[in-house]
Image (tube, rainbow, N blue to C red):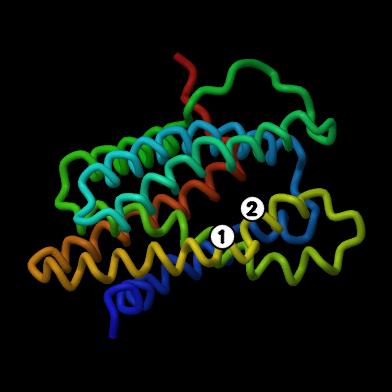
Amino acid sequence: MSFTDDTWTRTAGLRTAVENSAFLAELGAGSLDPATFRHYLEQDTIYLAGYARALSLLAARAPGPESAGFWAGSAHGAASVEVSLHADLLAGGRLPEPTGPALASPTTLGYVSYLVAAAATAPYAVAAAAVLPCFWIYADAGRRLAAHADLVADHPYARWVAAYDAPEFHLSVERARRFVDEAALAAPGDVEAMHEAFATATRYEWMFWETAHTREGWPAA
């Protein structure tokens, strides 16, 4: 069994929690509160800027030009393509106006800080495992939600769903998995730490959906 197959199996319980999240269920049904979707987009825009930094750090430490080019290209995609999608959705006139500047929630800040720290200080293989859930879990969610979204006339979140079920996004997941599997083979002593990193990031993915649904913020001073 490859590392990525094994770690996907090991995190089945966490991924079930992701699949059962109220946020994704309501998003797929098209019933998600637009104000909640705005909050999610604002938080994800902040997250993507940090994720792009983590991917850039990972690219600089990659063992070869192909993996370095992939991680660097993914950093560009997170920082420009996905952020552009979010900006278009925020400005599309279907969401309520912002109530003030968006601040990183505790969960967003924790997830970004974890990924940047892993990319900067953990062994390359461990850092690669840490960034993988964001690719893979989004693609998995996009594929599952697309089947439901197609059944809803004028689905308000169809563009978001389509972006993460796009063939090119699924291809990027397969490439990311390949580089992580190669890293596991090259550094067998880091495999258990890789599993821990993948599980930690998967847990953050779950928390991100949960706290988006509750519109998590900082407690008042």
Q: In the image shown, does 61 or 141 lie closer to the viewer?
A: 61
If you read the primary sequence from the N terminus, does the residue marked by circle 2 or circle 1 appear first? 2
Label 2 Cα crowd, 10 Å radius (few <14 / some 14-19 / many 20+): many
Q: In the image shown, does 70 or 29 lie closer to the viewer?
A: 70
- The x and y percentages for residue 94 are 84, 36
Mark 1: which amino acid? Phe
Q: Which element type, helix, strand or loop, lies under badge 2? A: helix
The residue at the point 38 percent across, 45 percent down is 72
The residue at the point 87 percent across, 63 percent down is 152
Cα–Cα span, label 2 and label 1: 21 Å
Pointer 2 residue: 23
Residue located farthest toward the right when viewing the structure as drawn:
153
Residue 169 bears which disc, if any?
1
- The x and y percentages for residue 57 are 28, 39
Tell me the quarter of the picture where residue 193 sits.
bottom left
Q: Which element type, helix, strand or loop, lies under badge 1? A: helix
The residue at the point 58 percent across, 61 percent down is 168
Mark 2: which amino acid? Phe
